[in-house]
Structures are given as C-alpha cells and as structure tokens.
Image: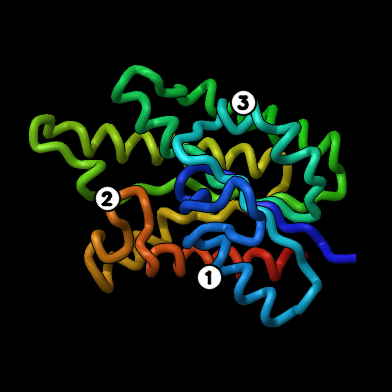
Amino acid sequence: MSKVILFQGDSITDSGRSREYDCYGGYGYPTLIKAQLGYEKPGEYVFYNRGVSGNRVLDLYSRIVCDILNIKPDYISILIGVNDVWHGFVGNGTGLKRYEKVYTDLIADIKEELPNTKIMVLGPFVLQGTGTVSEEDPQHWEIFKNGVTDMAEAAKRVAAKFSLPFVDLQEKFDEACKKAPADYWTVDGVHPTAMGHEIIKRVWLDTFDKIK
C-alpha cells in the first residue's frame, strides 16, 4: 500500500494548487518533491497538498479534522508562521504566545490521533522584498523580520518539545542570498520563486531521508 505524504501550510505551500484535483498540487515545492520521489519510487507514495493561502496557525488548527486527521498521512510537513506576523500589520496577527500555544496543541492532537504519523516542522522565513519593506514606514522591515524570527524560534521549541525534526529555512535562504539577491529567491520577500521552492525541496528531501 502506498504511503501518504501531506504538505500543510499557507500560500508558500498552496502555490496555486487545485481544490478539485489532488493530482495538481500547484507550482511549488510540494510538486517538486512529488516529481522527484514519484520518479524515483513509482507507486510508493501518494501526495496531498492542503496548504491554504493566507493561513495562520489558528486557521490551520481549525482545519485539523478535514485536512489532516481524515487524510491519515504517514508523513506530514508543516510550514506556518509568516502570516501570523504579516496579518499583524492590519490588526489580525496571532501573537507569539498564542502562536506557540496553538502550534503545540496542533502537534499534540495529531500525535494523539495519529501516533504513527511522522511530522516535520519547517520554520517560517522572510527576506527583504516588495511585500516586506515599506518606504513609508522605515521600521516595517525590522518589525517583520523580528516577528518571523520569533515565530521560527517558537516553531523550533514546539518541534523540540515533541522530538520532531526542525528545518531552519531562514538559514537556507540567507545562505542562498550570498549567491544571488533576495528577489532571485522570492518574488516579494515571502513567496518563493521557482529557485526558492527548489531550496525548500532540497532541504525537505534531506530531512525526509532521515525520518522515513
């Protein structure tokens, strides 16, 4: 029987996926991973992308039954946190304490209901770009950057609490920016280009090899 891999998160994971056909998982890292694993191991895995654009950890937790528990994945990766900061600029942010609490509850519920599911936590990341830097507000970038850094540290603490692998995407994107500017890796400082999605794909597969 094929093992089920589930990708969860926000627009970075969503990447224009179809809501009707699971065979079309969007243009991002889930499809890149599906292409490589599907080619190397025909029929061994089934892939589901359930990322939803705009989601915060609160929104993801509200979908836990239909988009996680009912799917019963053998493996799940979660990338959530940038919107928990981004939405704060319009008064709808999550807040660090609530982010960590809800993330902890999310993982605890998954582990209780699906004890054999292997979970990978991907840390949120941000670069300078048109969506993260504001000429009108010189402090905008610092607030954004510090907020996402705090969320990534919280996600890392949650992963450690449950002895789960944590993938530091900020580190990977910062390393990439030594080779090419930020707008080569992300469209706006948040959403990856094709090359940015390749970064996520590679580190995802490296981590997957350690937990499969």
- C-alpha span from label 3 to label 1: 28 Å
Residue found at x 71% / y 50%: 119
- C-alpha span from label 1 to label 2: 21 Å
Q: Amino acid at mark 1?
A: Arg
Q: Amino acid at mark 3?
A: Val
Specify few, some or many for label 2: CA neighbours under 10 Å numbering under 14, 14-19, or 20 or more.
some
Q: Closer to the observer: label 3 or label 2?
A: 2
Q: Which residue is mark 1?
A: 202
Marking on residue 188: 2
Q: Which residue is mark 3?
A: 102
**Residue 153 visible in the snapshot:** no
- Report helix, strand or loop for mark 3: helix
Residue 97 is situated, as x and y percent measured from the top left of the image, at: 51, 22
Residue 54 image-quadrant placement: top left
Between 64 and 120, the one lying in front of the other is 64
Can you name the residue that lies furthest to the front here? 20
Residue found at x 58% / y 58%: 25
Comes first in the chain, label 3 or label 1: 3
Can you name the residue that lies furthest to the right here? 1
Residue 175 image-quadrant placement: bottom left
User: Looking at the image, is 180 positioned above or below residue 131?
Assistant: below
Residue 36 image-quadrant placement: bottom right
Residue found at x 75% / y 79%: 41
Residue 99 is situated, as x and y percent measured from the top left of the image, at: 53, 27
Comes first in the chain, label 1 or label 2: 2
Can you name the residue that lies furthest to the left here? 136
